[in-house]
């Protein structure tokens, strides 16, 4: 109520005045400028101003006058009104008269750009712009011309306008023209044909992508969000966007099923079929990288708003899908930006998730030794938080785990950082029980690479924990890579100088039985790990007794013979097998009077006196 009182009190005398009362064209210019200012200050007030009985007609008159300053001011007002739902409802007379369409051919670049932006906003709001629409083609043509001629426009407009306005306009014309071009392109960028034309260029504008990259100054600019949105759209297929939106809404439906449903309900025509493919996305991504697009996105992250940060993080994560460009992302600062965004308290939950996922993707194939120690350590907390994020999907967890596995292999500093995170080892163990095979495997490999860190050793001292590792190692027919990782961890564990861990492995688990069983699995990699583990166990008298009882000696002798018959297959493990056999045969068994622990098939153990 208070706003309405101020509107009527302060604006009524001005709004009630007519051009005749004002005396000349200058009055109409100022009135249009007032409407623009009201929209910028408060959209509700702007709608009130434009809703006056003759306000829209006066804008049409100003455009028809041919006055450059007046036309630009009126077009700017129409553009701002098109951003508001109530404002769009007031523009019917302008649309019906064809005034907006006519402005697309105006020699005044600022008016042309504002009109193009207004039409784009109206089209998006009404969902009237489709790929094959003549309006879409015309708008794109206008946007490309504006983008291409931004610098020329600055010079030309300075000459045309009145002397009083020329100095200010000369400084702002190119910037405003570029901003409007970005607005139009951002509105059309969901169309596959538009994406390809922007990335690869065309007769309309061969340098569209380089100009967009050059327009990325920082995240504080008026077009920062639009530019970030354009890059995020260029680097993804529309079906992937749709799939992500459906997942966020927790809808149990695929994009293909949704498309079919839309056709059945007449919400989508066969002519609207999009042909965006991962291959086309890969080509566009390469073009972005070639035109310094990674650095452009890095600049946009500086001082960006929350929404712009999200678009930057999404664009970088989507670029990281292409393996060959990941090295460039590290070199050009994208890795650092993602670390900062993933750790920023001001970033949205989605932005943090996207940035951490990008770090994981980059680390999957990047040699961690090329990163600085600070980069390695700073990437670990975001990745660990992503593992604990129950709203993250399995692919995010999988790639984060692979990245951590890579980092864990570097040195003690990275192992310490991973395990020092609150609930770090527990989070990895939790993911070992994932329903997804690849997530289970990656979690197991990550834990293996963390050995011999004390916290992982402490974790393995628990007989209940060892059961899982033994079970994984024996399940090689269903999941060989996970079995290989688990067997390797067990082999390393028995070689550690830790009495409590050794007690668990030898007397409170089925580890020895698992090693002997792996000798006959037929996989050289598993046999190698079992052989190493048995060699370590040969130094423990109780273990030697159990090894012989489980049939380790015959199994090793059989492998020695097999290696002679098929040296091609077994050459890599022949030395390990022979060494394990020699160690077991020469080892001292436990005193029969000592306590013997028997482990049954379920992994339970029974203590009895030896005879």
Image: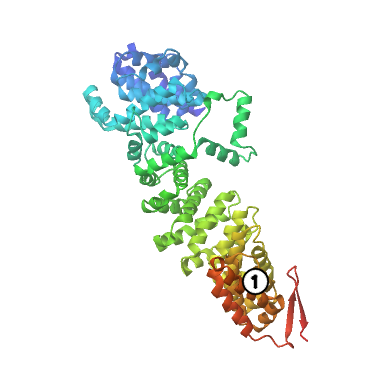
Mark 1 is surrounded, within 10 Å at the Cα level, by few (under 14), some (14 to 19) or many (20 or more) other residues, namely many
Q: x, y (%) of residue 44?
A: 47, 27
Q: Which residue is mark 1?
A: 515
Give the tally of numbered discs. Answer: 1
Q: x, y (%) of residue 388?
A: 58, 55
Residue 498 seen anywhere in this rendered image of the structure:
no
Q: Based on the displayed image, in which of its 4 quarters is residue 484 positioned? A: bottom right
Q: Which residue sits at x=75%, y=76%? A: 598
SS category of the residue bearing label 1: helix
Q: Based on the displayed image, in which of its 4 quarters is residue 143 positioned? A: top left
Colour mapping used in the image: rainbow
- Towards the viewer: 188 or 18: 188
Q: Is residue 601 above or below residue 157?
A: below
Q: Residue furthest top?
A: 20
Q: Based on the displayed image, in which of its 4 quarters is residue 438 positioned? A: bottom right
Q: Is residue 502 above or below residue 208?
A: below
* Left or right: 156, with 203 as reference point: left
Q: x, y (%) of residue 426?
A: 61, 62
Q: Residue furthest front?
A: 565
- Towards the viewer: 573 or 52: 573
Q: Is residue 95 above or below residue 356?
A: above
Q: Which residue sits at x=61%, y=32%? A: 258
Residue 148 seen anywhere in this rendered image of the structure:
yes
Q: Which residue sits at x=50%, y=64%? A: 408
Screen quadrant of the C terminus: bottom right
* Left or right: 566, with 144 as reference point: right
- Towards the viewer: 150 or 237: 237
- Towards the viewer: 63 or 37: 63
Q: x, y (%) of residue 571?
A: 53, 69
């Amino acid at each position: 109520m208070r706003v309405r009182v101020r509107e009527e009190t302060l604006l009524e005398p001005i709004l009630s005045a007519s051009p005749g009362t004002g005396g000349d064209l200058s009055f109409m210019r100022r009135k249009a400028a007032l409407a623009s200012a009201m929209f910028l200050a408060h959209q509700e007030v702007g709608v009130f101003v434009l809703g006056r009985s003759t306000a829209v007609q006066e804008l049409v008159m100003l455009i028809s006058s041919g006055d450059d300053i007046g036309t630009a001011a009126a077009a700017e007002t129409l553009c701002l009104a098109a951003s508001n739902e109530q404002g769009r409802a007031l523009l019917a007379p302008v649309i019906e008269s064809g005034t907006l369409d006519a402005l697309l051919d105006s020699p005044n670049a600022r008016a042309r750009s504002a009109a193009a932006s207004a039409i784009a906003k109206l089209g998006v709001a009404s969902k009237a712009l489709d790929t094959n629409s003549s309006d879409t083609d015309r708008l794109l043509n206008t946007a490309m011309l504006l983008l291409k001629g931004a610098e020329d426009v600055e010079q030309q407009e300075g000459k045309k306008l009145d002397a009083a306005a020329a100095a200010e306009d000369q400084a702002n014309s190119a910037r405003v023209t570029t901003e409007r071009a970005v607005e139009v392109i951002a509105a059309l960028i969901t169309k596959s044909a538009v994406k390809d034309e922007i990335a690869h260029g065309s007769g309309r504008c061969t340098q569209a992508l380089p100009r967009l990259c050059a327009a990325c100054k920082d995240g504080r600019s008026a077009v920062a969000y639009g530019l970030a949105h354009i890059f995020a759209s260029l680097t993804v297929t529309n079906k992937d966007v749709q799939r992500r939106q459906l997942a966020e809404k927790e809808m149990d439906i695929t994009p293909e099923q949704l498309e079919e449903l839309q056709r059945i309900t007449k919400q989508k025509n066969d002519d609207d079929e999009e042909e965006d493919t991962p291959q086309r996305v890969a080509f566009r991504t390469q073009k972005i990288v070639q035109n310094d697009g990674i650095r452009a996105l890095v600049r946009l992250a500086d001082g960006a708003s929350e929404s712009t940060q999200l678009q930057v993080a999404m664009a970088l994560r989507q670029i990281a899908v292409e393996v060959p460009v990941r090295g460039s992302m590290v070199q050009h600062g994208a890795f650092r930006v993602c670390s900062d965004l993933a750790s920023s308290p001001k970033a949205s939950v989605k932005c943090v998730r996207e940035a951490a996922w990008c770090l994981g993707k980059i680390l999957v194939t990047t040699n961690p030794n090329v990163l600085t120690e600070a980069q390695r350590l700073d990437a670990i907390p975001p990745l660990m938080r992503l593992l604990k994020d129950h709203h993250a999907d399995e692919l995010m967890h999988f790639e984060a785990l692979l990245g951590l596995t890579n980092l864990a292999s570097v040195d003690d500093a990275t192992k310490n950082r991973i395990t020092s995170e609150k609930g770090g080892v527990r989070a990895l163990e939790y993911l070992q029980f994932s329903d997804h095979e690849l997530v289970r495997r990656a979690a197991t490999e990550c834990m293996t690479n963390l050995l011999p860190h004390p916290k992982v050793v402490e974790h393995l001292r628990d007989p209940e924990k060892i059961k899982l590792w033994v079970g994984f190692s024996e399940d090689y027919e269903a999941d060989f890579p996970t079995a290989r990782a688990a067997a390797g961890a067990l082999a390393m564990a028995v070689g550690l100088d830790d009495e409590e861990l050794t007690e668990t492995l030898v007397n409170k688990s089925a580890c020895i039985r698992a090693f002997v069983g792996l000798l006959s699995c037929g996989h050289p990699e598993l046999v190698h790990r079992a052989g190493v583990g048995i060699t370590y166990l040969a130094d423990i008298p109780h273990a030697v007794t159990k090894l012989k009882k489980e049939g380790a000696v015959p199994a090793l002798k059989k492998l020695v013979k097999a290696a002679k018959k098929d040296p091609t297959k077994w050459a890599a493990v022949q030395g390990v097998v022979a060494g394990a056999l020699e160690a077991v045969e020469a080892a001292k068994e436990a005193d029969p009077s000592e306590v013997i622990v028997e482990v049954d098939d379920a992994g339970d153990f029974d203590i009895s006196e030896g005879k």
